[in-house]
Amino acid sequence: MDKLRFLTSGESHGKALTGIIEGIPAGIELSSVDMDKDLARRQKGYGRGGRMKIETDHADILSGVRWGKTTGSPISILIENRDWENWYEGMSPEARHQDAIKPVTRPRPGHADLAGALKYDHRDVRNILERSSARETAMRVALGAIAKKFLSEFGIRTGSYVIGIGGVKAEGAKEKSDAGSLIKTYEKAESSPVRCPDKEASKKMVSIIDKAAKEGNSLGGIFEVFVTGAGLGSHIQWDRKLDGRLAQALMSIQAIKGVEIGLGFGMAGKPGSEVMDEIFYKTETSKTAGRPSGFYRNTNNAGGVEGGMSNGMPIIVRAVMKPIPTLRKPLKSVDLNTKKAFSAAYERSDVCAVPAAGVVGEAMAALVLADAFLEKFGGDSRKETERNFRAYISYLGKF
Ligand SMILES: Cc1cc2nc3c(=O)[nH]c(=O)nc-3n(C[C@H](O)[C@H](O)[C@H](O)COP(=O)(O)O)c2cc1C
């Protein structure tokens, strides 16, 4: 991240999450509502645990926005943890509360617990698990909503939907090439309890989540994120490549274990003649990708990125989420102090969070794209960015 930078802080049961994003030009309309909508989407999804029911996240804007518009200053956001009152002493920064709750000495398999305790020299695993928790993704979603709002000013849309949970698969959009049908697929998914556009698959997903919950088990799955339009990134250096930046951003989400762009791993089983997206040209202007262009493709196996640059086709990225590691069915582990084996105790947890992870994926993709957009078009104010953007679009039209 270069032009657009952000950081998050906060613990799962601490007082609040905080985030700072810097680089959004002045003059972009922004309110808490823009963020709260996505925060609510992150909290939904069939298979979530009890915590989602006690909390309704709200993004409080602390700086960088005045009278409904960004000022160009860093934007800082606060999301309170509503459960914090119950953790006032347990998560207190003050030394006098240090024995308020018992240390956690039993690392959970599949979490940061053991590696973190050893690496950071903690005898209380809580010092690790509070920060490694996916609670942190609430702030990523809030900051991502700011990036989405910025991109939408230039006709760029982001969305996501679930295409697999457990063994149940739904039709994806890998090879779909037009932005309109992706947006329709996304809108269809928004009314599904598992954020899946395929009704039949949705029903099956709900029932396998019920089955896993009954058995004390958990499930993972696959979601797809798309971004329309653009012409961003670069071929010239490894860390400027858009596909690499997207993969890193998506992979950094808790429990994401694989990322593919376009046909991705499917390319391994096909000959070159079936993988490359051939190039055509027509003299009239195409509005498909939200910008004029005479060049077009009939396929999108590349997922909208070639040579580290978005080629004007929708960017399509998939990510796979592992099953939730906290299970009611106990997993074996070893106590840090006694070195004795135990079966992990169950704490309230999600059975499946793929629908929520998709919302986080959307946020991360938007943050990467907004950064790449600002790299290309720059600008300290909305008007300046727009001038630069329009000039490029008009140049492309004449190319
Ligand atoms: C939206 C979301 C919700 C999650 N909810 C839970 C949960 O309730 N219980 C749990 O054990 N893990 C949950 N996870 C997964 C863990 O945070 C993650 O597996 C853990 O931090 C270890 O990191 P790693 O899987 O990336 O190695 C969730 C992940 C995401 C993205």
Image: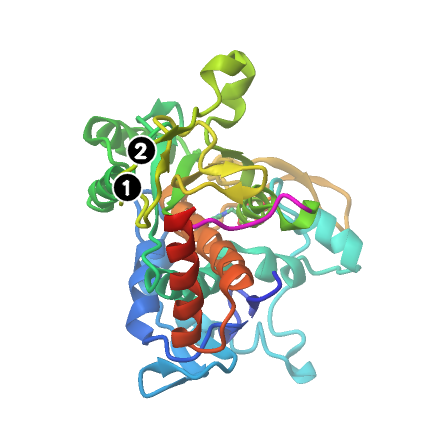
Q: Which residues are magenta?
A: 230-236
Query: Circle 2 — which element?
Result: loop
Mark 1: which secondary structure?
loop
Q: Residues within 10 Å of mark 1 (few under 14, many from 20)?
A: some
Mark 1 belongs to which amino acid? Answer: Ser
Viewer-proximal residue among 92 and 191: 191
Q: Amino acid at mark 2?
A: Lys
Q: Position of residue 287 (x, y in %)?
A: 27, 45
The residue mark sitting in front, 1 or 2, is: 2
Query: Does mark 2's beta carbon lie closer than 8 Å to ligand 1?
Result: no
Q: How many marks?
A: 2
Residue occupying the point 53% across, 57% down: 372
At x 44%, y 52%, the residue is 360
Assess whether mark 2 and mark 1 are in contact (beta carbons under 8 angstroms). Answer: yes
Q: Is residue 93 above or below residue 230?
A: below
In this view, the residue in front, 74 or 117, is: 74
Point out residue 58 in the picture as x, y percentages from the top left corner.
Answer: 35, 72
**Vertical relation: 262 (above or below) 52:** above
The reply to whether the magenta stretch includes residue 234 is: yes
Give left or right: position of 15 versus 128.
left
Give x and y (percent) for residue 253. Answer: 53, 49
- Location of the N terminus by quadrant is bottom right
The answer to which of 201 and 234 lies nearer the viewer is 234
Q: Is residue 139 left or right of residue 32?
A: right
- Give the labeled residue for mark 2: 282
Q: How is the model colour-coded?
A: rainbow
Q: Residue at x 34, y 25 (%)?
A: 169
Identify residue for label 1. Answer: 286
**Which residue: 72% across, 53% down?**
116
**On screen, residue 89 above or below 204:** below
CA distance separating discs 1 and 2: 8 Å
